[in-house]
Image: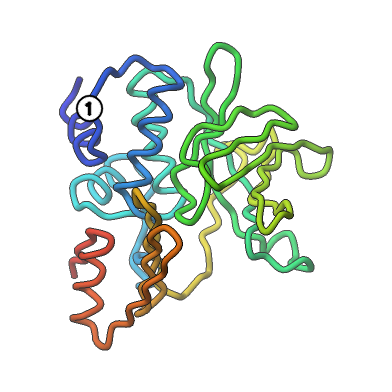
């Protein structure tokens, strides 16, 4: 095992066998979501972004930052390939919180991973930040996937291709969709135009979220909201809740 893989595994606090099985994939995916946040701070602060593996490794592992869905899943796919997994990167359309009449070209773009095991593909995704599966989801039309109180299902049609739905208040809501040919070779990442500073991370008992100077701490059924009053407080909260230290 090379030193970069060792550092990555230390960052996500993983120890154990590295035989490339679906069980290992589930453990790595869950650990990743509990230790590395989704965040868009470089975009919101007008800083440059690189999708080159050395740059992503420096940012996320060495500098202990998070990233957007492209950054997180590109780097995670590198780790999986290094460990012997068969991985395909897929671009998707992200439908959560999108108005019904939104033009197709304005629907946020997302990246996810398909991991093949013994001829069966599984969705693996560490780039959503908010509620989304923490374990691999079999790419089988009609399959339902439960994690605690969260319930997801996979469907497929001619227009949208593969679709991952989430159950929300007894209704099914489309989370994202992608086609079999939506790979890296055919698309360029279209970064979100979101100007708000955002960070999200799962925790063992809930999740932490941040939008601008408002921090929300979800623990079980309770919610605590914390609003910072100045840049110093904001940077301290960013470190406390997301373990992110921003450098000039």
Residue 64 at x, y = what percent?
Answer: 22, 52
Please give the count of numbered marks on the rendered protein: 1
The residue sitting at the bottom extreme is 229
Does residue 26 appear to the left or right of 133 in the view shown? left
Of 234 and 135, nearer the camera is 135
Does residue 28 appear to the left or right of 1 in the view shown? right
Q: On screen, 10 above or below 222?
A: above
Residue under label 1? 15
Residue 173 at x, y = what percent?
Answer: 70, 54
Residue 161 at x, y = what percent?
Answer: 75, 38
Of 133 and 230, nearer the camera is 133
Element under disc 1: loop
Residue 36 at x, y = what percent?
Answer: 31, 49
Q: Residue at x 40, y 55 (%)?
A: 206
Does residue 81 appear to the left or right of 88 in the view shown? left
The residue sitting at the left extreme is 3
Crowding near the residue tagged with mark 1, few <14, some 14–19, many ≥20 C-alpha atoms within 10 Å: few
The residue sitting at the top extreme is 118
């Amino acid at each position: 095992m090379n030193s970069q893989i060792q550092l990555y595994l230390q960052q996500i606090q993983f120890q154990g066998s590295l035989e490339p099985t679906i069980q290992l994939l589930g453990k790595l995916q869950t650990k990743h979501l509990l230790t590395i946040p989704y965040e868009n701070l470089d975009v919101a602060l007008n800083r440059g972004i690189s999708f080159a593996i050395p740059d992503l490794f420096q940012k996320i592992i060495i500098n202990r930052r998070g990233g957007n869905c492209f950054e997180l899943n590109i780097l995670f796919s590198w780790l999986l390939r290094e460990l012997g997994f068969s991985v395909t990167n897929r671009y998707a359309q992200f439908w959560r919180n999108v108005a019904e009449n939104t033009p197709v070209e304005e629907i946020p773009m997302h990246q996810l991973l398909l991991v093949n095991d013994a001829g069966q593909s599984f969705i693996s995704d560490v780039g959503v930040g908010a509620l989304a599966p923490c374990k691999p989801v079999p790419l089988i039309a009609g399959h339902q996937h439960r994690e605690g109180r969260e319930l997801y299902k996979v469907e497929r049609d001619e227009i949208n291709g593969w679709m991952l739905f989430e159950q929300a208040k007894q209704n099914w809501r489309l989370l994202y969709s992608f086609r079999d040919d939506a790979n890296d070779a055919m698309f360029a990442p279209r970064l979100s135009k979101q100007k708000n500073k955002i960070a999200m991370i799962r925790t063992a008992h809930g999740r932490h979220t941040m939008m601008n100077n408002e921090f929300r701490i979800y623990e079980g059924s309770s919610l605590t909201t914390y609003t910072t009053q100045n840049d110093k407080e904001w940077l301290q909260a960013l470190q406390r809740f997301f373990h992110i230290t921003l450098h000039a």
